[in-house]
Amino acid sequence: MKILIIGGGLAGPVLALALKRAGYEVHIFDRVEAPHPASGEFEPGALGGGLTLMENGLRVFRRLGLLDSIVAAGTPVLSYDMLNILRCNISRALFTALSKEGVQLQPNKKLVSITQPDPAAHTLGVTAVFSDGTQTSGDILIAADGVHSTVRSILFPDVRPVKTGFVGYLGVSEYDTDVTPAICPTSSLTFLTNNTAGKSAMIMPSAPRSVHWAMYETSPADIAYDGWTSVTDVPGEAARLSAMANYGA
């Protein structure tokens, strides 16, 4: 059976590795043009910020035989059964394993349409058509392309994510252990909250001399936002992030 996976973030590669080991033919497609995650060409934060993997996530990597490499690339939180790690390091471990299994990510593949057999035929089959004019057919297509899924918008155009006004900024920063040891501890998470203002933040060591951090707030104005575009107003976004960091506000 040939399985097509749309989306090369984290869920797609994890699923691809499990399916390949179960004996299926697997192909991954992603619209982003980027170096291969296993190439080592990524800087911290290149594929997003960091993640905290809880015990259930670590269990998945244990079953895939990747736990040791994932733990080695992250920072265990000693008071909890969890791990802080940069997203790019998870991708590197996943795609290194997939490469050994003979599964390659095909970048620059922006999905534009999906065709399926007549339901009356009662047969499996699907064809994914991409913006570069190529197409690939398989028995099953799996959507792993995130909250703004192109697959969902094609197959179920009336189904859309529910907006809550919850907005988050994530980043990766380097630090000097000789200067900021109290701010950036080596094996813990630091939480900051202001429930009255609807703000929260976390700072987590994720690799040697680097941390990933996140700031969140809930704003009714963001419920009306209807798009998914790259940031263009950098000063405006920086001002909002600065205001979010002011926990006295």
Image (cartoon, rainbow, N blue to C red):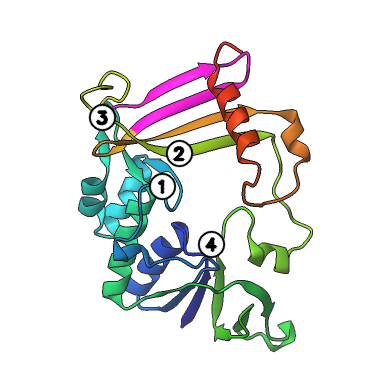
Q: Secondary structure at mark 2?
A: strand
What residue is shown with label 1? 45
**For residue 22, side relative to residue 76 (left or right):** right
Compare marks 2 and 3 and give the one earlier in the sequence: 2
Labels in figure, total: 4
**For residue 71, side relative to residue 94 (left or right):** left
What residue is shown with label 4? 144
**Marks 2, 3: nearer the viewer:** 3
| Dots 2, 1 in contact, CB < 8 A | yes
Compare marks 3 and 1 and give the one earlier in the sequence: 1
Compare marks 2 and 1 and give the one earlier in the sequence: 1
Residue type indicated by callout 4: Ala
Quadrant for the C terminus, please: top right
What residue is shown with label 3? 176
Q: Secondary structure at mark 1?
A: loop
| Residue pictured at 43% horizontal, 33% vertical | 213
Question: Counting other residues with Cα less than 10 Å from the Cα at mark 3, is it few (<14), some (14-19), or many (20 or more)?
Answer: few
Residue type indicated by callout 3: Asp
What residue is shown with label 2? 171
Residue 159 found in image quarter: bottom right
| Residue pictured at 57% horizontal, 35% vertical | 168
